[in-house]
Structures are given as C-alpha cells and as structure tokens.
Image: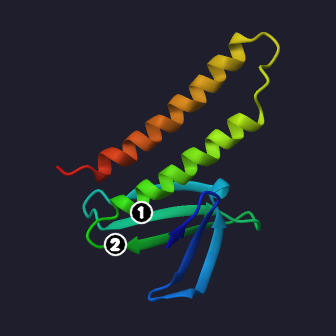
Amino acid sequence: VAVAPSTITVTEHGNPDGIIEEYRVRFLSFMGIAADNVRMCAFIMHTSQNKFICHVFHCEPSAGPLCKTIEAACKLRYQKCLDAHPQTPKGGLPGKSLRNSIKQSIQCVWGSVTSLTSPK
C-alpha cells in the first residue's frame, strides 16, 4: 500500500508496479484497526459507481503506521478543502461554529483510531 497526499494505491506484495487499485483520499469513508488484533486494519472507499469497497490488510508488526499515514493524508486533504473555501458565510459566527463542529468531529474520529493503535 502506497499513500500519497491525494491517493491510496494498493499494489501486489513485492511488486510495486502491479497496481491492484488506486483510490482518491477524498473518497475514503472509514478506516480502522481491529480491536483484538493491531496487525489488522481496513478502509472503506466510495467508488464512482456508488458502491463501497472494503480493503483489509495484515501489517507487520502493527497496522498503526499505515493508519497514521492515511490519517495524515486525510488531514492534508481536509486542510486543502478549508484553504480552497476561505470566505466566511453571511452572519460570520454560524459558519465558524459549523467549521469548528466539523473539525471536532474529524478529530474525534481520528482520536478513536489513535486510541485503537496505542499500546495497552
């Protein structure tokens, strides 16, 4: 699995040129690490055919670094969205509170993922 700021590329094991699938980070719907096995992680992508595809991976020694890398790509994508729409909606504060609410929701999701990857 290769993660870039805007794409996640799944390749054959040991063959980086053997691309199985390539997804845009913006279509990532969910990502997580198994509660009972930190070596297992998965992400769900929303496709252009309006379907959802789940990819599950076994990582050694832990799935934490892969999920952290995908998390960083998502945060970068989110920041690019904020930067692309800098104008404040009419009324000022409601837009800011909506922006903060969205930001807090995303931080909560990533906090949940982070707590799953932390050693116990």
Q: Quadrant of residue 51?
A: bottom right
Question: In x, y percent, where is residue 10?
Answer: 55, 76
Q: CA distance from mark 2 to mark 1?
A: 8 Å
Check the image and report above or below for 91 versus 89: above
Is residue 119 toward the left or the right of residue 107 in the image?
A: left
- Give the residue type at disc 1: Leu
Task: Residue at 34% x, 59% y: name it.
Answer: 64
- Residue that label 1 marks: 66
* Callout 1 crowding tier (Cα within 10 Å): few <14, some 14–19, many ≥20: some
Is residue 87 toward the left or the right of residue 66 in the image?
A: right
- The foreground one among 36 and 113 is 113
* Callout 2 crowding tier (Cα within 10 Å): few <14, some 14–19, many ≥20: some
Task: Residue at 35% x, 46% y: name it.
Answer: 114
Q: Looking at this view, name the residue that lies furthest to the right.
A: 90
Question: In x, y percent, where is residue 108?
Answer: 44, 35
Numbered circle sitting on residue 75? none
Task: Residue at 28% x, 62% y: name it.
Answer: 38
- Residue that label 2 marks: 59
- The foreground one among 24 and 79 is 79
Q: Earlier in the sequence, mark 2 or mark 1?
A: 2
Is residue 61 toward the left or the right of residue 50 in the image?
A: left
